[in-house]
Image (cartoon, rainbow, N blue to C red):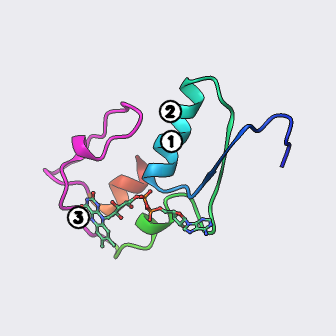
Amino acid sequence: MDMDRENTLIVGAGPIGLACAISAKRRGLDPLVIDAGAAVNSILHYPTGMSFFTTPELLEIGGHPFTCAAEKPTREEALMY
Ligand SMILES: Cc1cc2nc3c(=O)[nH]c(=O)nc-3n(C[C@H](O)[C@H](O)[C@H](O)COP(=O)(O)OP(=O)(O)OC[C@H]3O[C@@H](n4cnc5c(N)ncnc54)[C@H](O)[C@@H]3O)c2cc1C
């Protein structure tokens, strides 16, 4: 880790960690995000084809629009987002 460059460490690259990273970046910080697995590791391990029970606008992070084909997004659409 480059301690001169990185001034914020975020542990966990799930939706919350990524939202924190976007927020930190917009405040002029240069966060380093680390994860024990892959990015969005929890969603990656959802069952294939699983639909969220939450509608997409409530899952958006960083103000980026999340569109999906049906009313509720699937695991695959969330991974693409
Ligand atoms: C089957 C299923 C369906 C779900 N459906 C919905 C839904 O419809 N709507 C909804 O809002 N929520 C749903 N959830 C819950 C959803 O997974 C969470 O809301 C969301 O993932 C929480 O995001 P998070 O970033 O807080 O945690 P997580 O997504 O769990 O991210 C945490 C990250 O931290 C990493 N991590 C953990 N410990 C360490 C460590 N010690 N060092 C480094 N990295 C670490 C993990 O690998 C992971 O990537 C569902 C969950 C499951 C299991």
Instruction: Tell me the element at label 1.
Output: helix
* Neighbours of disc 2 within 10 Å: few (<14), some (14-19), many (20+): some
Q: Which residue is mark 2?
A: 23
Reply above or below: 62 against 38: above
Query: Is label 1 in contact with label 3 (beta carbons under 8 Å)?
Result: no
* Residue 10 left/right relative to 57: right
Q: CA distance from mark 1 to mark 2?
A: 5 Å
In this rendering, the count of numbered labels is 3
What residue appears at the point 69 percent right and 33 percent down from the top-left corner? 30
For the record, the magenta segment spans 49-73
Residue 21 pos. (x, y %):
55, 40
What residue appears at the point 59 percent right and 30 percent down from the top-left corner? 25
Q: Which residue is mark 3?
A: 51
Residue 61 pos. (x, y %):
38, 40
Q: Which residue is mark 1?
A: 20
Sequence-first tag of 3 and 2: 2
What residue appears at the point 65 percent right and 29 percent down from the top-left corner? 29
Q: Nearer the viewer, residue 48 or 59?
A: 59
Instruction: Tell me the element at label 3.
Output: loop
Sequence-first tag of 1 and 3: 1
* Residue 9 left/right relative to 45: right
Query: Is label 1 in contact with label 2 (beta carbons under 8 Å)?
Result: yes
Residue type at numbered disc 1: Cys
Residue type at numbered disc 3: Ser
Q: Is residue 60 magenta?
A: yes
Reply above or below: 51 against 48: above
Instruction: Tell me the element at label 2.
Output: helix
Reply above or below: 55 against 60: below
Q: Main secondary structure of the magenta part?
A: loop
Asked whether mark 3 and ligand 1 are closer than 8 Å, the reply comes as yes
